[in-house]
Image (tube, rainbow, N blue to C red):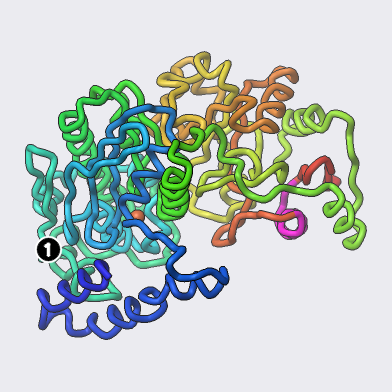
């Protein structure tokens, strides 16, 4: 109801500009959303009164704090928008979560990022992480322009200059014609990127860098405010903007927080986790266990995989030590995949459903981008590293974000030439530290790779093709193996290898 009220008020406030948005906005809010609790009750065959619900940002805050290892912490939730809030500072203590301050729609870091994502020709709610990757290729030359789009206050609050935006008046476009006057014409959607030779694409990369600059400024100021308001030295972050791992790294480096925690499903999927944890606390009166692994999904059955291989006429081996076999293939520069264990919760591939390869040569990055993932060549790949060895390879290694790949670290200067496939253009990497608790199979694989004389590091990317959903089941895994140019795959204990 709060959201419906906010949408209706926004349409009335912006009348007559919002007249085109009004019918679709109302349809979207009054359609299934308003009856969702009744629909859930009917689906679960329970009385409607048995269903509790919680605010969007409280769910985000709960998913961050109650999954964290901290007894007390500052909590920051930042996204496009919830019901009517876009950012909030919370104080988490034991089983309590208190909202200290909030910033209301339409002033929103997530909606600013979304508007520029659209201006850059990417899909909103899909392309934001591409913008973050693109930013490293540009220079923040447009600080003055972005300072006009956003009025930053010294106390961490901010306001968007709404004349540059259109998301409050139009359902189809997030920015106004005034945005194109200040930043230039938008980029054509779907046009191939050519950062090396196209001066216009370099301009777009510079805008992405400028957006990233102001985003980091806003997040850092909010983090400082959160520290002042709570007096805590640990911070938990959630909301879609908390997946901005470059900003997360800066919070840890540049604010007074000693530790920062961001669980892997920090975006809206994590709202379900937060709501479940709030329900747990209400029923059990105590906090659930801290999250130590993202492997919370359904598992892989060897029997089911064998049955499918037989029906598809595929041959396989079941080596006694699949990790040694895996490591030998990686050492031969083969590109493989893991579909083992329970699949990971959240948007990051963390070793249960992953494409894996040697991290050493930049040619491997280009090959996987071009041939396997079929995506923009500027997109970086992440390294997974044995946690016990991470201090030999990365600066700022091993904190509470690295098991979930929600921050970045710089590769040590003397190691840069050994990690060409996972080094981003600015020398950073979205590192994942791996141990027995966080990703047991990937831990064994990294140990086996090191035993073969290679770095204890693997290139790790999600097991899906461009625009495809992530592989979940045995059938998904085999379909991916048959339709993409992988050299080998471990599906449970079954090793499938393509000849040649
Ligand atoms: Fe959200």
Specify the quadrant of the image occupied by residue 464. bottom right
Expressed as whole percent of the image width and height from the top left, the position of residue 450 reads: 69, 20
Describe residue 296's horizontal placement relative to residue 243 as left or right: right
For ligand 1, the image quadrant comes to bottom left
Residue 265 showing in the rendered view = no
Describe residue 356's horizontal placement relative to residue 140 as left or right: right
**Residue occupying the point 48% across, 15% down:** 414
**Residue occupying the point 66% across, 36% down:** 357
Q: Secondary structure at mark 1?
A: helix
Expressed as whole percent of the image width and height from the top left, the position of residue 37 reads: 43, 70
Q: How many marks?
A: 1
Q: Is 104 included in the stretch rendered in magenta?
A: no
Specify the quadrant of the image occupied by residue 210. top left
Residue range of the region highlighted in magenta in the rendering: 474-486
Q: Decide: is 203 above or below 417.
A: below
**Residue occupying the point 30% across, 41% down:** 97
* Residue in front for this viewpoint, 282 or 180: 282
**Residue occupying the point 32% across, 50% down:** 58
């Amino acid at each position: 109801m709060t959201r419906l009220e906010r949408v209706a008020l926004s349409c009335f406030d912006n009348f007559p500009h919002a007249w085109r948005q009004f019918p679709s906005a109302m349809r979207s809010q009054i359609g299934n959303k308003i009856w969702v609790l009744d629909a859930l009750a009917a689906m679960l065959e329970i009385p409607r009164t048995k269903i509790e619900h919680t605010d969007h940002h409280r769910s985000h805050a709960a998913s961050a704090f109650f999954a964290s290892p901290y007894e007390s912490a500052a909590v920051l939730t930042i996204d496009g928008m919830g019901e009517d809030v876009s950012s909030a500072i919370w104080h988490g203590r034991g089983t309590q979560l208190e909202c200290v301050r909030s910033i209301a729609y339409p002033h929103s870091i997530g909606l600013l990022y979304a508007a520029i994502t659209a201006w850059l020709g990417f899909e909103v709610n899909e392309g934001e992480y591409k913008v973050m990757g693109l930013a490293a290729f540009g220079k923040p030359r447009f600080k003055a322009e972005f300072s006009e789009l956003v009025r930053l206050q010294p106390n961490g609050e901010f306001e968007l200059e709404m004349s540059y935006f259109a998301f409050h008046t139009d359902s189809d476009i997030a920015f106004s014609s005034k945005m194109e006057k200040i930043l230039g014409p938008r980029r054509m959607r779907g046009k191939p990127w050519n950062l090396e030779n196209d001066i216009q694409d370099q301009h777009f990369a510079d805008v992405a860098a400028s957006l990233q600059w102001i985003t980091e400024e806003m997040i850092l100021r909010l983090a400082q405010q959160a520290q002042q308001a709570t007096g805590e030295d640990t911070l938990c972050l959630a909301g879609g903007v908390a997946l901005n791992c470059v900003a997360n790294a800066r919070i840890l480096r540049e604010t007074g927080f000693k530790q920062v925690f961001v669980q892997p499903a920090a975006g809206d999927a994590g709202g379900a986790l937060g709501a479940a944890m709030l329900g747990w606390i209400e029923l059990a009166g105590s906090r659930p266990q801290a999250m130590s692994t993202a492997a919370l999904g359904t598992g892989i059955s060897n029997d089911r995989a064998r049955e499918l291989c037989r029906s598809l006429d595929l041959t396989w081996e079941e080596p006694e030590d699949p990790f040694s076999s895996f490591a030998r293939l990686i050492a031969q520069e083969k590109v493989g995949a893991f579909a083992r264990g329970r699949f990971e919760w959240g948007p990051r591939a963390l070793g249960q459903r992953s494409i894996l390869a040697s991290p050493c040569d930049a040619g491997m990055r280009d090959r996987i981008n071009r041939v396997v993932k079929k995506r923009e060549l500027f997109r970086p790949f992440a390294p997974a590293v044995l946690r016990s060895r991470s201090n030999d390879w990365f600066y700022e290694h091993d904190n509470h974000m690295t098991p979930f790949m929600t921050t970045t670290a710089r590769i040590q200067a003397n190691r840069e030439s050994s990690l060409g496939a996972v080094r981003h253009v600015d020398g950073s990497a979205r590192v994942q530290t791996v141990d027995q608790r966080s990703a047991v199979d990937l831990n064994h694989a990294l140990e086996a790779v090191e035993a073969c004389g290679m770095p204890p590091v693997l290139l790790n990317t999600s097991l899906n093709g461009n625009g495809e959903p992530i592989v979940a089941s045995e059938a998904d895994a085999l379909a991916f193996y048959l339709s993409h140019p992988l050299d080998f795959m471990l599906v449970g204990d079954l090793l499938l290898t393509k000849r040649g």
